[in-house]
Amino acid sequence: MASRVDASGSGAKGKGKLEDIMQELALKEEDLDDVIFEDDDAPAEEELRWMVLARVHMDKGFSTYWFFRNMRSAWDLARPVKMKTLEDNLFQMQFNCLGDWERVTQGGPWHFRGNPVIIVPYDGYSKPTSIELFKFEIWVRIIDLPIAYHGKVKALAAKLGEFVDSEPSSFDFEGNFYRVRIKLDVRNPLKKATSLIRGGERQIFAVKYERLPDWCQVCGMMGHEFKEHSDGVHPPSALIFKNLRAPATTAWGTKRRNSN
């Protein structure tokens, strides 16, 4: 029963994590006297709905008070949200309406002091510390992509991160780029481009990220800036991950205005 409801899930993966815990705590089967959790023991549905776990991807310490305050302001919620600190840089939140929950889980990326706030839905049964909080969704622009290659957008986006969605290919939208939504893993450096080969010839397409959190222009990682990388002193030639944030002024996702 324990492995079924554990955050690691069922099967070999869940069993392996359970065995790791038993080894860490030097437990044997005879040391355990399981409590059985039946379906009738489950809390009411409203007690567990619209919850998330959150973590700020930054190396420096920060004020929980200001984190909660800033996020409430950024989210502009319709109803109050409950926030709880589980442990250092791990937070549990519960919203009071579906609209607020969807805005927070689907409307990112969210930032705190320029650093990504990683948010995942939470079911109330999984161990909070066993849930990975490394990925967040973001819109990316593939620059100067010819229309003939739009059928390969999913494959091109998958080279940047985990593909989630894309804007439709249409003459009704402005901009010399194709817009895709991906999941970025903060453990990996940002990608500067994606590429394909046609007829033996490679074509490279630069990418820019919308509402990109702060990142290091030396190593391409999020969580610190280039002045915090090593001793912070770098020649311009070392800033090879520059100009990755898409300009906020470029319109996209709205139809071209009628000139008549």
Image (cartoon, rainbow, N blue to C red):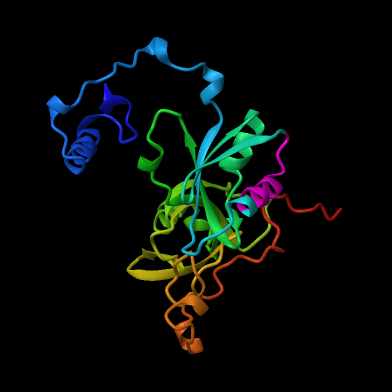
The magenta segment is 67-78
Task: Report the residue that reaches farthest toward the bottom.
Answer: 235
Q: Nearer the viewer, residue 187 or 206?
A: 187
Horizontal and vertical percent position of residue 52: 52, 37
- Quadrant in which the N terminus appears: top left
Q: Is residue 217 magenta?
A: no
Q: Residue at x 36, y 71 (%)?
A: 201
Horizontal and vertical percent position of residue 60: 50, 64
Horizontal and vertical percent position of residue 141: 56, 60
Picture layout, residue 76 above or below residue 59: above
Q: Is residue 214 visible?
A: yes
Residue 4 as seen in the image, left or right of residue 89: left
Q: Nearer the viewer, residue 94 or 180?
A: 94
- Image quarter of residue 66: bottom right
Q: Residue at x 69, y 34 (%)?
A: 80
Q: Residue at x 63, y 48 (%)?
A: 68
Task: Report the residue that reaches farthest toward the top.
Answer: 40
